[in-house]
Image: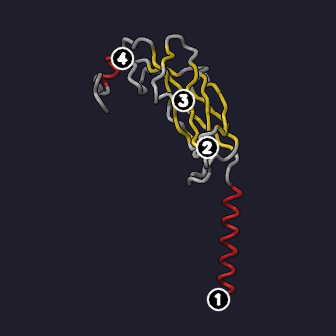
Amino acid sequence: MARAVALISAFCILALAGIAHCAPEKFNVVGKVYCDTCRVQFETRISQSIKDAAVRLECRNLDNKTLTYSMEGATGADGNYNLTVDGDHERDMCVVTVVKSPREDCKETVKGLEKAIVVCTANVGMKSDIRHANPLFFMKDLADERCSKVLEEIDFLPGQTM
């Protein structure tokens, strides 16, 4: 009986060591930046991807709010970005923020919606090292003339709450 307990204990220790060893040391944070052409604060079929939009990822310690990691990147032609985050940030809150739009007609942000929280730790049950951030946007100065038709198609009326 003691031999069986020792054998089971050895397997458990090896399994835990394998899990700790497999934890990724890098994460890929992916996301999208678009122009909200209808000024409705969500993506529609006429929203436009923004090429060369600047984004920043910052991780801050949950206890004392000190900055532990920071990096900037830009979107590609499709409006998507891919940021490589070094290290495990289990004790941090990591946030991607839109910084600057290259489009003069689409550069307004909405306070509170200019950021997306991402989890950059292996200790949350996810096996992949890819982390998906919610889409981020800038709003166009004036709504596109096609917006009323687009919003009607999805039964969304201005002032309607979702």
> Does label 4 or label 3 sit earlier along the sequence?
3
Near mark 2 (Cα within 10 A), the count class, few <14, some 14-19 or many ≥20, is some
Near mark 3 (Cα within 10 A), the count class, few <14, some 14-19 or many ≥20, is many
> Does label 1 or label 3 sit earlier along the sequence?
1
The alpha-carbon separation of the residues under discs 4 and 3 comes to: 21 Å
Residue at horizontal 31 percent and vertical 33 percent from the top: 162
Question: How far from the left and from the top, in percent, is residue 28?
Answer: 64, 39
Q: Which residue is mark 1?
A: 1
Quarter residue 59 falls in: top right
Q: Which residue is mark 3?
A: 32
Disc 4 is placed on an element classified as helix
> Does label 1 or label 4 sit earlier along the sequence?
1
Q: Which mark is residue 47?
A: none
Q: Which residue is mark 2?
A: 61
Q: Are marks 1 and 2 in contact (CB under 8 Å)?
A: no
Q: Is residue 86 above or below residue 23?
A: above
Q: Which residue is mark 4?
A: 147
Question: How far from the left and from the top, in percent, is residue 16?
Answer: 66, 65
For this view, does 106 lie left or right of residue 83?
A: left
Residue at horizontal 58 percent and vertical 46 percent from the top: 63
> Does label 1 or label 2 sit earlier along the sequence?
1
Question: How far from the left and from the top, in percent, is residue 99?
Answer: 58, 23
